[in-house]
Image (cartoon, grey):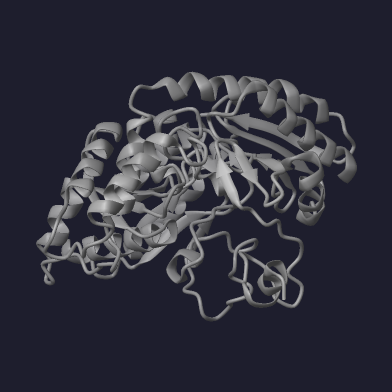
Amino acid sequence: MTPTEFDACHLWHPYSSLSDPGPTHMIAEAEGVWLIRPDGTRMIDAMSSWWCASHGHRHPVIVAAMEAQLRRMPHVMFGGLTHQPAIDMGRSLTRLLPQGLDRIFFCDSGSVSVEVALKMAVQYQMAMGRGNKTGFATIRGGYHGDSWKAMSVCDPVNGMHGLFRGALSIQNFLPRPPVRFGEAWPDAPDRNGLAGLEALLAAKGNGIAALILEPVVQGAGGMYFYHPEWLRGAKALCAAHDVLLIFDEIATGFGRSGRMFAMDHAGITPDILCLGKALTGGHISLAATVATAHIAAEIGNDAAGVFMHGPTYMANPLACAAGAASLSLLEDGAWRDRVAQIETQMREELEAARNLPGVADIRTLGAIGVIEMKDRVDPRIAHARASRTGIWLRPFGRNIYCMPPFIITPEQLSRVTAEMVSLAAGAS
């Protein structure tokens, strides 16, 4: 049995069936923007390997930090112990985050970060004497991970509610904000979408612990960009009803939307923030859930006296070393110009698909480019073309999209956008 035959028979891949696994590409190396096959042929990783490899693969600064840490201490438990990589990374995060978000809980992955945030919200409400506040509100079109509670706040139609009907807890869903990013903001709540949130909180706010959402950019739920002003209104309404505000910036954090964090477009901060993906530049898994000092203090004063969560690999030193190195690459701000250039180039080059009969919309924001089709796109078509075109894309739903590494050159990006337009033409 060849390696690829063994893989197809025994190894589950994300969202796949072992009875019909579909095509996969063997990758032997990754460097910069490139995925390198065993025969030496290369594909541009236009997905940043699911949006995390923002600095490119095998960045020398991050690799050096990991190699040095590996020789000293790859792992030690965080219960009752601490270490310099966690402290260094914590300091880097507090320098980058808006003032007030500075109580950091390190965890394993984005889904776990969301689970931690939801637990924090409920434990905080209990500490405040509001034990009836155990539910959650969110907006449709969202995605917050595949673990159990996180699934319950994903989109109820395109998420996993149908498959796990009866097993998932029922949450409160609002229409997604109707005003798109860049459109004029109407002040009337019935036109800007805030009237629905106001009505929900007035009717059910006494049972809702928190509102969780992806600020400005909804990722896996449809690559939808909405107006930042909605977040400002939502924060005021949540505060009026003692409902916490949780931002999931796992996909958008660390420059992807053109700002350090997507919430920076709105100029507000949540009570709790979820981070992951690009936190280590895509070199190793690590996530964080960050809260305000007030949230942390109240949880520490409740009946338990401690926050009830503690992953085995929490604050793994190797991952923290990678994260501190990755964040150091963002601190000089040079990424801002690179992302702005990527956005401008994608906006110009993707316009070639605007008038194709199957195209519904084209949109860009930061280092995110999307061609939305009128009908679903079969990702296997893009996968089968990748070895020939040298461009790795993974469409989902009706979206042909890219989230390239920030280090991509204009020439490489033109190859990516040309392939996106070609895929759109073939699907039209």
| Rendered-image quadrant of the N terminus | bottom right
In percent of width and height, residue 388 lies at 82, 43
In percent of width and height, residue 395 lies at 71, 49
Considering depth in this image, is 175 or 191 the residue closer to the camera? 175
In the depicted structure, whether residue 274 falls above or below residue 204: above
Is 244 displayed left or right of 33 in the figure? left
Which residue is at 16% across, 65% downward? 79
Is 156 displayed left or right of 310 in the figure? right
The answer to which quarter of the image holds residue 341 is: top right
| Rendered-image quadrant of the C terminus | top right
In percent of width and height, residue 69 lies at 27, 49
Which residue is at 74% across, 23% downward? 349
Q: Can residue 236 be seen in this snapshot?
A: no
Which residue is at 48% across, 41% downward? 58
Residue that extends furthest to the bottom in the rendered view of this protein: 166
The answer to which quarter of the image holds residue 415 is: top right
Is 190 displayed left or right of 375 in the figure? left
Which residue is at 68% across, 74% downward? 6
In the depicted structure, whether residue 19 falls above or below residue 229: below
Q: Can residue 33 be seen in this snapshot?
A: yes
Considering depth in this image, is 238 or 99 the residue closer to the camera? 99
In percent of width and height, residue 83 lies at 16, 52
- Count of picture labels: 0
Considering depth in this image, is 131 or 386 the residue closer to the camera? 386
Considering depth in this image, is 124 or 64 the residue closer to the camera? 64
